Amino acid sequence: MEKITVAGAGIMGIAVAFHLSSGGHQVNLWGTDFDEQTIEILLKTRKYKKLHINVPKSINVFHFHEIKKALEGTKFIIFCVKAEGVERIPKCIAPYLEPGIVILNIAKGIPEFPHLTLHNLIESKIPKNLSGEISVVSMG
């Protein structure tokens, strides 16, 4: 099974993390700067209040500032954030990317500036030395 980091602790991020965890994958749920309160509650109670569910201990939960730890050894990074979050997240993860990582974007929308698709925006933020060694896949 793979080690996967889900970026974003909103409803979509939780749903994806649950599904992957139930399939036996090692899942890290990394909260963005929008998710600090949610992450704090998850770490203290393991409850996701919006859906009234318990988050299994098999899902590792990380604060925004713990990005390095959340990405250690990961094979896949799944972006489960709002479109405006996609503009910032690639910059945050860029220093920790390694050859062979696959980024899957399931966010939708168009960033305000520059006027690129989210897929192209993510690709434009990958460090030049890793160009061609990081795969970006987008859904939708």
Image (cartoon, grey):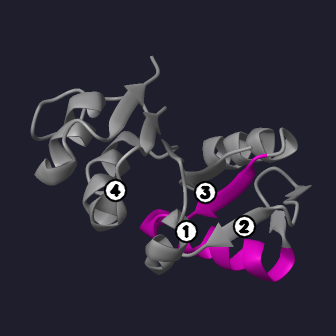
Report the side of 74 relative to 91 (left or right). right
Q: Which residue is mark 1?
A: 70
Query: How dense is the environment of label 4, judged by Cα within 10 Å: few (below 14), some, or many (20 and up)?
Result: some
Q: Which mark is residue 60?
A: 2
The image quadrant that residue 49 belongs to is: bottom right
Kindly report the distance in space between the C-alpha atoms of the residues bearing marks 2 and 4: 19 Å
Q: Which residue is mark 3?
A: 9
Q: What x and y, as percent, mark residue 50?
A: 76, 54
Secondary structure beneath disc 3? loop
Residue 122, above or below 55: above
Q: Residue at x 53, y 75 (%)?
A: 69
The image quadrant that residue 120 belongs to is: top left
Q: Nearer the viewer, mark 4 or mark 3?
A: 4
Is the Cβ of the residue at disc 1 closer than 8 Å to that at disc 2? yes
- Magenta range is 25-45
Q: How many marks?
A: 4
Residue 32 included in the magenta stretch of the image: yes
Kindly report the distance in space between the C-alpha atoms of the residues bearing marks 4 and 1: 13 Å
